[in-house]
Amino acid sequence: MITSDIQLAADELSRGGLVAFPTETVYGLGADALDEDAVRQAFALKGRPAHNPLIVHVSSTEMASRLVRNWSENAERIASRFWPGPLTMVLPKADRVPSVVTGGGDTVAIRMPDHDLARSLIESFGGPLVGPSANRSGTISPTTAAHVEDSLGPDILVLDGGPCPRGIESTVIRLTEAGAEILRPGVIGSDELAEIVPVIHSEHELTANAPLPSPGMLKKHYAPRTPTRLVDDLGELPGQAVVVCISEPPASSRAIRMPSDASSYAARLYAALREADELAPEVILIERPPGIGPIWDAVRDRLSRASAQN
Ligand code: TXA
Ligand code: MG
């Protein structure tokens, strides 16, 4: 059920239930982060493997600091610069954070969303909420309330905030005394982070040009049901394809045109992949966007996972 009633949503959370809520990135599947049973329900509804940890959403840095063993100087600096915003910090967890939240590990991922409804919901409920993307595990993340219902069914209560303005998931960093390591690319990139804390580039990143694997960073993820391929030019397209592209598509093809600036492309991406899927072609061909900068890097990360083979 889709609602705009924050109190109704907060009451559902207080009963130990689940509520999907909007953020600036994608919709999250909210549950009381300190209630093991509620968190287990969120894992079950998503079909998510128990070892893949969840992000805890807060409405203040004070709330964040009570979830970690030690709120470090680096954490404070990152929070003052990037919160509220699409940046998630992984830090050693406090004992009160149940280990179901952290996939059994001793670190917890935390962020403060840049969305009024999300923060109002956390405030009305009165505590931190887990918020994995509100979709079945491995599928395309939801950027509207209708996407959430399509993925999780009509029984889930969805707080409607309209389309998510950013459109792709937050940057996830592991934060230590030494600095920040990017685990999942997002709209906040390493140059912006490096203005605040040292950015550690792992061996893995240097050799494989890929971010350090976080437990949830699967090669295939964010994927349409239809086989999906990344292509470099739109020359020879099979007739049964749907093409997702910035440049002019061949006259004969079914195409979904994408905006050419990075922010608009990212905001549109997941809805476009869903539309392509609904056309039920034999294959979805995505023109690889050539742009430079953190948002394009994050977009290409999602596109490579959407088109990865099992
Ligand atoms: O933008 C977002 O981050 C959205 C909105 C709803 O906030 N949430 C989101 O959650 O994308 P989810 O669960 O779909 O992705 C969380 C990512 C996964 O890749 C997970 O492995 C990683 O964060 N993560 C969570 N806790 C972690 C931890 N303790 N250590 C390393 N990675 C962690
Ligand atoms: Mg997800």
Image: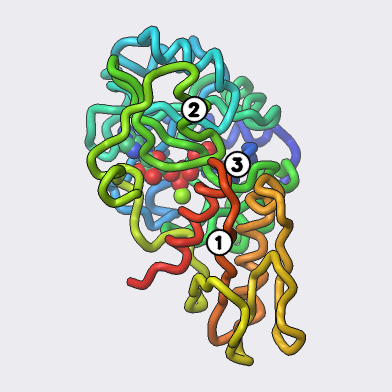
- Residue type at tag 2: Arg
Query: Spatial distance from mark 2 to mark 3, Cα to Cα?
Result: 12 Å
SS assignment at label 1:
helix
Are discs 2 and 1 less than 8 Å apart at CB?
no
Mark sitting on residue 233: none
The one nearer the camera, 82 or 293, is 293
Question: Is label 3 in a helix, a strand or a loop?
Answer: loop
Task: Residue 35 in the image: state x and y as whole percent.
Answer: 39, 31
**Mark number, residue 25:** 3
Name the residue tied to disc 2: 111
Q: Identify the amino acid type marked 1.
A: Ser
Instruction: Tally the numbered discs.
Output: 3
Q: Which residue is mark 1?
A: 151
- Residue at 51% across / 48% down in the picture? 297
Looking at marks 2 and 3 on the same chain, the residue that comes earlier in the sequence is marked by: 3
Image coordinates for residue 246, horizontal then vertical, percent: 69, 64
Q: Residues within 10 Å of mark 1 (few under 14, many from 20)?
A: some
As helix, strand or loop, the secondary structure at mark 2 comes to strand
Tell me: is circle 3 under 8 Å from ligand 1: yes
Q: Is residue 27 left or right of residue 251?
A: left
Note whether ligand 1 is within 8 Å of mark 2.
Answer: yes
* Residue type marked 3: Thr
Q: CA distance from mark 2 to mark 1?
A: 24 Å
Q: Residues within 10 Å of mark 2 (few under 14, many from 20)?
A: many
> x, y (%) of residue 189?
50, 35
Residue located 42% across and 38% down the image: 38
- Identify the residue at horizontal 63%, vertical 25% (top origin): 119
